[in-house]
Image (cartoon, helix red, strand yellow):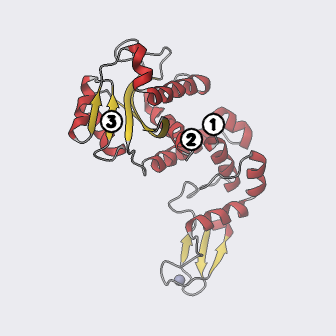
Amino acid sequence: MQTELTSFWEWQQHYSDDDACLQAIIKHRWPTGFCCPRCQHTKGWLLHTRHAFECTECHHHTSITAGTVFHNTKLPLVKWFWCIYWLSTDKGSISALRLTKLIGVSWRTAQRILRILRNAMGEQNSLYKLTGTIELDDAFVGGKHAGKRGRGAKGKTAILVACEHNNGKPGFVAMKAVPSIDKENVRKFAQENIKQGQTLNTDAFRALNVLSETQHHIAKVTPAELVDEWLPWVHIVISNFKSYLLGTYHGVSGMYLQEYLDEFCYRLNRRF
Ligand SMILES: [Zn+2]
């Protein structure tokens, strides 16, 4: 779903009721118009309350929301659309507590909406594989104090972060929470998020050497004062993610951390 409307005012005007939202989903799913999956007939009656089309030829019902975040929802679509706006705009993010007040739902419902949307953002992120020159590093996040490998890392979750470095500018970003920074997890992270045969810059941490199997890996032992020269963008991303966690959510547990990473990463990558 494109969020090219800039202000919430415009967004609200555009998606002002459930019909407007349903029409937007229809347009997204059938850009050239509805087509019955059973008989290929191109006319259908819209069954508003069931979020479905009934084919005028064979009377087959086709769900409009199947395979989307809105499937089987009891909540008005307009509330979903507003949540999407709050979660995906640049300023970014919204807590479940604030959502309960804004759209008048229980905390549990707000939490469920956020989880569904964050997972969808993660799916969207996973469609892209990083290419070109890429900075890759690890960090420990989520606890009370900032920390790096071993030091002050108690209660924190390890993450792997990769960021494209395009002519002195940051490009697409991939972020993943992992049980530990070891060979297996690094290998899997690279397989899932980076196209083979790219140039990877790292700080020569031993577990990262596994990257040489499939990538052109340039490992430089980097003293702390030079790290911002060698891996500038990946460190800005990590530091911004830490501020975002501190500013919005205190004590995010390891279990949910990936959802916050997905949301953060989605907003970063949406710049393109
Ligand atoms: Zn049909």
Classify 10 Å Cα crowding around label 1: few (below 14), some (14-19), many (20 and above): some
In the image, farthest residue toward the front: 167
Q: Residue at x 66, y 32 (%)?
A: 97
Q: Residue at x 57, y 27 (%)?
A: 244
Let me know if residue 269 appears in the view: yes
From mark 2 to mark 3, how far is it between C-alphas? 23 Å
The amino acid type, in three-letter code, at marker 2 is Arg
Q: Would the CB of label 1 be found within 8 Å of ligand 1? A: no
| Above or below for 19 versus 162 | below
Badge 2 vs badge 1, beta-carbon distance below 8 Å: yes
Q: Position of residue 201 (x, y in %)?
A: 34, 31
Badge 3 vs badge 1, beta-carbon distance below 8 Å: no
The residue to which callout 2 is attached is: 267
From mark 2 to mark 1, how far is it between C-alphas? 7 Å
The residue to which callout 3 is attached is: 200
Q: What numbered label is drawn on residue 92?
A: 1
Classify 10 Å Cα crowding around label 2: few (below 14), some (14-19), many (20 and above): some
The amino acid type, in three-letter code, at marker 1 is Gly
Q: Identify the mark nearer the N-term, 3 or 1.
A: 1
Q: Residue at x 58, y 67 (%)?
A: 64
Q: Secondary structure at mark 2?
A: helix
Q: Residue at x 55, y 46 (%)?
A: 117
Q: Secondary structure at mark 3?
A: strand
Instruction: Tell me: 143 left or right of 70.
Output: left
The amino acid type, in three-letter code, at marker 3 is Leu
**Can you tell which of label 3 and label 1 is closer to the viewer?**
3
- Front residue of 27/250: it is 27
Q: Position of residue 190 (x, y in %)?
A: 31, 40
Q: Position of residue 170 (x, y in %)?
A: 49, 37
